[in-house]
Every structure is written in structure tokens, then in C-alpha cells.
Amino acid sequence: MASLPLKLVAFAGILIHICLRIQVEAYASLLDRITALPGQPQVGFQQYSGYVTVDEKKQRALFYYFAEAETDPASKPLVLWLNGGPGCSSLGVGAFSENGPFRPNGQVLVRNEYSWNREANMLFLETPIGVGFSYSKDASSYQGVGDKITARDNLVFLKNWFLKFPQYRNRSLFITGESYAGHYIPQLADLMLEFNKKEELFNLKGIALGNPVLEFATDFNSRAEFFWSHGLISDATYTMFTSFCNYSRYVSEYYRGSVSPICSRVMSLVSRETSRFVDKYDVTLDVCISSVLSQSKVLTPKVTTLLINRL
């Protein structure tokens, strides 16, 4: 019987520890709460942004922006959004140019009617280290950035982010993104599934890849087929684009800083025929030029005869 008070004291101590931990975690998210962004309209959902440390030793930290769902966030899934590049900001591009709650309009922000936070709690992550506001105080961290390190950092970010937002730990989770996130997303999902074998932390329900970079040669070279099948380039240009300098070769030469004359000429021809007014990501969009005459001049097909032996 004498041990009963000791057990009660121990039990009370455990409860106090749990309560204090919950309070600390809740306070951590409150520190990241955004009362209002400059120039934003009034909204009914909560926003947060801040840093999550992914490597204490090298003081590496990733920056995030989190917009809860417009209505009933407790019942909506959690969606992680990753832009690609590598080097594209999920904040500047993803959150404020694509599927976030606001769009810049002059000196103010306006609501984005197509925002994904109408249906989900949106978590935008700037990754890898060096992108946007994400940083490391150890300069060597910027030298060895690659897919494996990025996937590892993203996994640690999510683990530590859940400490700030414990209410989302068991929430249905989807990883989404575009472009080079075609590398980030599958590798992160693989690490999450491996981690779940030891500890069930991630309630991963699915992934979604938009315009993904999966394999450079196949992905890049499909551009010629896409342009030609949508009537953006001529038969002759298509032949040159697939025979003399395909897009993967051009990109490789471009990043080496030595574009060959043949690739330079082929790409100039492709650019001239597709024109700068056609959105390559949505070729069905209207072409809006102020003057009908100007539009006619710009869009009038140009007949160009190129002799193969001159190339």
C-alpha cells in the first residue's frame, strides 16, 4: 500500500510531462503563425511560415509556408507541394504564382480562385538547401546538394514539422509537385515508406507529379512531338528537331556553355515558329495582343527554307 502514493506521483509526473510537451509543441506553431501578409485581403483560414531544422550540427534549416484549408481544416487532407528546378521556390512560384491562396496584383495580394487550399491544407516547402529562404550556416552544405540529400532533408523536415503541428500527424498526406519534383517526390515517398516500417508516422495516401522530369532524354525529346502534334512547328522543323539536334542535346550543350551552330539554328527556328506569345505549358490559351494588326503580323506563318547541307 505504501507504494501506491509513489505510483500516483509517478503517474502525475508523466501526465505533467505530456501536458507540458503538448503545450510546448502548440506554442512552437503559434510562433510561426501569420496574422496577415502585407496587402492581403481578409480571410478566414490560418497561415504559418518559418523554419524547421533538418541538421543541428551544420545548422541546416528549411523554410515553409502553410495555409490551412479555407473551411473545416480538421477534416481536410494535408498536401505537401514541391516545386522543381532544381532551384525553383515553392513559395515564390508555387504558393504565389500557381496554387496558393493569393496572387500578387501591384502592391496588394488578391485571392486565387483556383487555390488548392479550398480543398486541402497546403504545405509549401522550399527545398533543397539554398532555395528561397532555406539555408545552412555551413558553406559546405551547398556543395554536395543532390537528390539523396534532398530526400533525406525533406523526410527530417516532415518529422520535425509534425512536432510543431501534432494535430496533422495522422492526417491523410499527399505529396505533390512539378518539374524536377518528379525526382524529389518518389524518392521522398520511398523514404517515408521505409521509415513507416519502424514507426508508423506518415499516413501517406498518394503522390501526384505535374509535368515531371523523370528521365532527361525521353522527357526533353518529347517536346518535338508535342509541338508538332499541336501544330506549333512545321513538318520540316519537326524533322530537324528530331534528327539534327534534339532537345536533350541542346540542353546538355547549353549547360556546358557550348551550344553548337546546328543546335543554335534549330532552336532559333523552333522558337520563331512557336513564337514567344504561345504558353508552352498551355498551348490552348488565348494569345492576347492589343492590336489585331499586330497579332496578325506576329502570328503569320513564316516560310523558311533551310538547306540541310548548310547546317
Image (cartoon, helix red, strand yellow):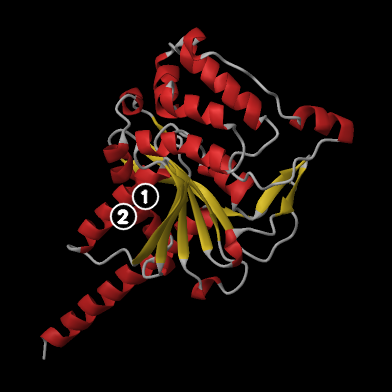
Corner quadrant of residue 184: top left
Question: How many other residues sit within 10 Å of disc 1, few (<14), some (14-19) or many (≥20)?
Answer: many
The residue under label 2 is: 189
Residue at x-position 41% and y-position 69%: 171
Question: Is residue 163 toward the left or the right of residue 272 in the image?
Answer: left
Residue at x-position 47% and y-position 17%: 263
Q: Nearer the viewer, residue 297 or 85?
A: 297
Q: Does residue 281 lie above or below 1 as drawn?
A: above
Q: Which of 111 and 25 is in front in this view?
A: 111
Q: Residue 185 carries which label?
A: 1
Q: Does residue 124 lie above or below 15 as drawn?
A: above
**Residue type of the residue flagged with mark 1:** Ile
> Secondary structure beneath disc 1?
helix
Question: Is residue 152 toward the left or the right of residue 137 in the image?
Answer: left
Which x, y percent locates residue 149?
28, 38
Residue at x-position 55% and y-position 43%: 229
Which x, y percent locates residue 5?
19, 84
Which x, y percent locates residue 71?
61, 72
**Real-space Cα distance between discs 1 and 2?**
6 Å
Q: Nearer the viewer, residue 254 or 232?
A: 232
Corner quadrant of residue 148: top left
Q: Nearer the viewer, residue 52 or 301?
A: 301
Residue at x-position 50% and y-position 47%: 50
Is there CB contact under 8 Å for labels 1 and 2? Answer: yes
**Residue type of the residue flagged with mark 2:** Ala
Q: Does residue 297 lie above or below 258 as drawn?
A: below
Which x, y percent locates residue 309?
48, 10
Question: Is residue 56 toward the left or the right of residue 289 in the image?
Answer: left
Q: Residue 59 carries which label?
A: none
Question: How many other residues sit within 10 Å of disc 2, few (<14), some (14-19) or many (≥20)?
Answer: many
Quadrant where the image shows the N terminus: bottom left
> Secondary structure beneath disc 2?
helix
